[in-house]
Image (cartoon, rainbow, N blue to C red):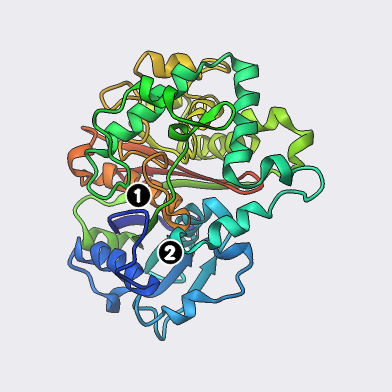
């Protein structure tokens, strides 16, 4: 990229199963108002807007147009992305590039979804090959069931270790007022006793379906320093893809090639040699408990096959060596179009020292990832000092 870019503000709705009290534009406006209001900004200071959601992967409904006035985008350049689960992180990367390129000084990035209205599941259910995949891999549960069973076979990870990830997530979420599922008393035994969805995934191994929105403001250096005393500087971003036929590529499900490629690239760009030692916090996109364990390995937090040991040792707890998802993560909150942007926003709040009760002390370097359909990964490194 050219000049530096930084996140100066972030805001999100309080995520729940169904937002029957608001329309989609009203819900999105809540996140925008909270984002801008956190730094006493107004829509007139925004030069351009980037919007992302699932929208059936097709981009044919143009929801960004019928909500333009509600989000302060009327009369401004308006960009739309709709590339699956990772779209929120793509919004953040696009906003960073628009600022770094010099085209705009201040860009508002927005991600949202009303999963209660059903469009998200319609898209995911039909994404698999109709003859060979759809009967067993329709939707996120089937796909992650295959991923988890492959990972168990390769790594020897146990159901108890996966359950510890859920317990960590739901307890962390209790410190986050925006999180959807907050379970202070959840236990490993409760996770293991929940009903089976797609072996080895049980109900409490999976993320919820949430309605919600998130927004961030990305700014050029001079504007960033005016807007906040400690911006979250974008040290590096990367996008990686892996096109695959799921039934022919079981190993790729546990060893996530696009996540490996994207994270290795941002580490190199940011000068990170040992992620576990050099990152202060990570917000990763883990729709299932087993996925987080596998991601520890693909992100090089540990060696292959050691993801379960990492959670056993408490490394990724709030007070551990490398806290992962102190916000509660996707396992606690999942408005798909906003979910990956929440990862970036939460990482930025950690760097800015504004994460509230789930703040990790002394965060200087944070990682955020998004992971979506056809293994599309975005990775972002944020730092407390300008690169």
User: Of the numbered discs in the image, which one, if any, rests on residue 99?
Assistant: 2
Residue 158, position as x, y percentages in the image = 51, 16
The residue located at (18%, 39%) in the rendering is 357
Tag 2's secondary structure? helix
Q: Position of residue 269 (x, y in %)?
A: 51, 40
**x, y percent for residue 365:** 34, 37
Label located before the other in sequence (1 or 2): 2
Report x, y in % for residue 229: 19, 53
- Relative to 196, 39 lies left or right: left
In the rendered image, the vertical position of residue 365 relative to residue 303, given as above or below: below
Picture layout, residue 312 above or below residue 67? above
User: Where does label 1 land, which residue?
Assistant: 233
Q: How many numbered dots are placed on residues in this image? A: 2
Residue 280 vs 3, above or below: the answer is above
Badge 2: how crowded within 10 Å, few (<14), some, or many (20+)?
Answer: many
Q: Kindly tell me whether residue 10 is visible in this rendering.
A: no
Q: Residues within 10 Å of mark 1 (few under 14, many from 20)?
A: many
Q: Residue at x 22, y 47 (%)?
A: 177
Q: Is residue 347 above or below residue 314?
A: below
Residue at 68%, 55% (x, y): give it.
126
* Whole-number angstrom distance, CA of label 1 to CA of label 2: 12 Å
330 vs 355, nearest the viewer = 330
Quarter of the image that includes the C terminus: top left
Mark yes or no: residue 325 visible: yes
- Looking at the image, the residue that sits furthest to the bottom is 75
Left or right position of 170 against 199: left
The one nearer the camera, 368 or 166, is: 166
Secondary structure beneath label 1: strand
């Amino acid at each position: 990229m050219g000049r530096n870019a930084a996140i100066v503000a972030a805001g999100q709705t309080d995520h729940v199963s169904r937002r029957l009290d608001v329309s989609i534009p009203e819900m999105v406006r809540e996140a925008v108002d909270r984002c801008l209001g956190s730094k006493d900004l107004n829509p007139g200071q925004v030069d351009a807007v980037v919007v992302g959601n699932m929208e059936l992967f097709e981009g044919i409904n143009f929801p960004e147009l019928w909500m333009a006035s509600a989000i302060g985008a009327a009369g401004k350049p308006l960009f739309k992305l709709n590339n699956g689960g990772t779209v929120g992180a793509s919004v953040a990367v696009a906003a960073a590039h628009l600022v770094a390129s010099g085209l705009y000084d201040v860009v508002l990035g927005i991600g949202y979804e009303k999963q209660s209205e059903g469009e998200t599941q319609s898209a995911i259910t039909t994404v698999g090959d109709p003859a060979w995949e759809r009967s067993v891999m329709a939707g996120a549960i089937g796909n992650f069931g295959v991923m988890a069973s492959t990972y168990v076979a390769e790594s020897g990870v146990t159901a108890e270790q996966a359950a510890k990830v859920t317990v960590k997530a739901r307890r962390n979420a209790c410190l986050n007022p925006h999180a959807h599922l907050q379970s202070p008393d959840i236990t490993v035994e409760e996770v293991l006793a929940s009903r089976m969805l797609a072996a080895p995934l049980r109900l409490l191994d999976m993320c919820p379906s949430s309605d919600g929105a998130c927004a961030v403001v990305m700014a050029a250096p001079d504007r960033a320093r005016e807007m906040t005393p400690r911006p979250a500087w974008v040290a590096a971003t990367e996008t990686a893809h892996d096109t695959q036929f799921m039934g022919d590529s079981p190993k790729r499900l546990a060893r996530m090639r696009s996540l490996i490629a994207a994270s290795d690239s941002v580490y190199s760009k940011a000068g990170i040699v040992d992620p576990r030692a050099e990152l202060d916090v990570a917000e990763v996109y883990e729709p299932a408990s087993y996925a987080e364990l596998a991601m520890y390995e693909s992100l090089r937090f540990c060696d292959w096959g050691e993801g379960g040991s990492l959670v056993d040792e408490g490394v990724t707890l709030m007070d551990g060596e490398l806290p992962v998802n102190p916000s509660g993560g996707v396992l606690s909150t999942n408005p798909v179009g906003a979910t990956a942007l929440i990862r970036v926003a939460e990482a930025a709040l950690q760097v800015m020292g504004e994460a509230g009760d789930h703040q990790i002390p002394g965060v200087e370097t944070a990682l955020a990832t998004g992971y979506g359909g056809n293994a599309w990964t975005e990775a972002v490194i944020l730092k407390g000092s300008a690169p």
